[in-house]
């Protein structure tokens, strides 16, 4: 029987993301106005209007790139994590078999970070979810550490595929809701 769990978490906006988004919007407006103004002066108003509208749209497009969500999908002991930009564009971050994890558990700041590749897919949702980590070996990236914030349903599916020595690192999960 197939096992399946899916979750979407929204990345929390920090001050830097808000500032970058605002600069993209303001830059698009400023560039659009400047292009239209210069085109009026050079007597090519029709071309200037099209270029100005293109600059407005470009600023809007770049600004929406800071609306980020992560989708966690567990199917038959395989974890897929996708990054979703502006609810339109999707980029696959990583696919890993849950049996390939060499270490797994709740993430704390005192965990040592070595020379591994860190895959950051932490978000916030309506409920506060703890951050978990999973260390594994990837054929392309080498040693990797995945940081993510799964729900109870996703954790339950992940637990089935983990090595028996790592299952206790998840802790006690609440009873399954019907």
Image (spheres, rainbow, N blue to C red):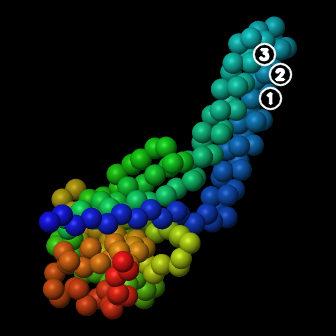
The numbered disc on residue 45 is none
Identify the image quadrant of the N terminus.
bottom left
* Tag 3 secondary structure: helix
Whether tag 2 and tag 1 are in contact, CB under 8 A, the answer is yes
Name the one closer to the observer, 107 or 9.
9
* Residue designated by label 1: 33
* Residue designated by label 3: 39
* Residue designated by label 2: 37
In this orientation, does residue 43 appear?
A: yes
Q: Residue at x 49, y 43 (%)?
A: 88
Q: Is residue 141 left or right of residue 175?
A: left
Name the one closer to the observer, 159 or 134.
159
Q: CA distance from mark 2 to mark 1?
A: 6 Å
Name the one closer to the observer, 106 or 151.
151
Q: Residue at x 29, y 88 (%)?
A: 169
Tally of marks? 3
């Amino acid at each position: 029987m197939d096992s399946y769990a899916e979750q979407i978490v929204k990345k929390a906006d920090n001050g830097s993301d808000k500032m970058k988004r605002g600069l993209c919007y303001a830059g698009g407006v400023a560039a659009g106005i400047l292009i239209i103004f210069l085109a009026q002066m050079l007597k090519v108003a029709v071309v200037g209007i099209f270029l100005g509208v293109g600059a407005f749209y470009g600023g809007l497009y770049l600004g929406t790139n800071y609306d980020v969500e992560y989708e966690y999908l567990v199917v038959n002991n395989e974890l897929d994590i996708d990054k979703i930009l502006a609810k339109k564009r999707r980029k696959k971050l990583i696919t890993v078999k849950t049996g390939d994890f060499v270490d797994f558990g709740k993430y704390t700041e005192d965990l040592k970070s070595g020379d591994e590749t860190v895959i950051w897919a932490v978000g916030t949702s309506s409920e506060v979810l703890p951050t978990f980590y999973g260390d594994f070996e990837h054929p392309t990236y080498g040693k990797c550490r995945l940081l993510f914030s799964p729900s109870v349903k996703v954790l339950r599916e992940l637990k089935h595929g983990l090595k028996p020595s790592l299952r206790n690192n998840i802790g006690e999960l609440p009873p399954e809701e019907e």
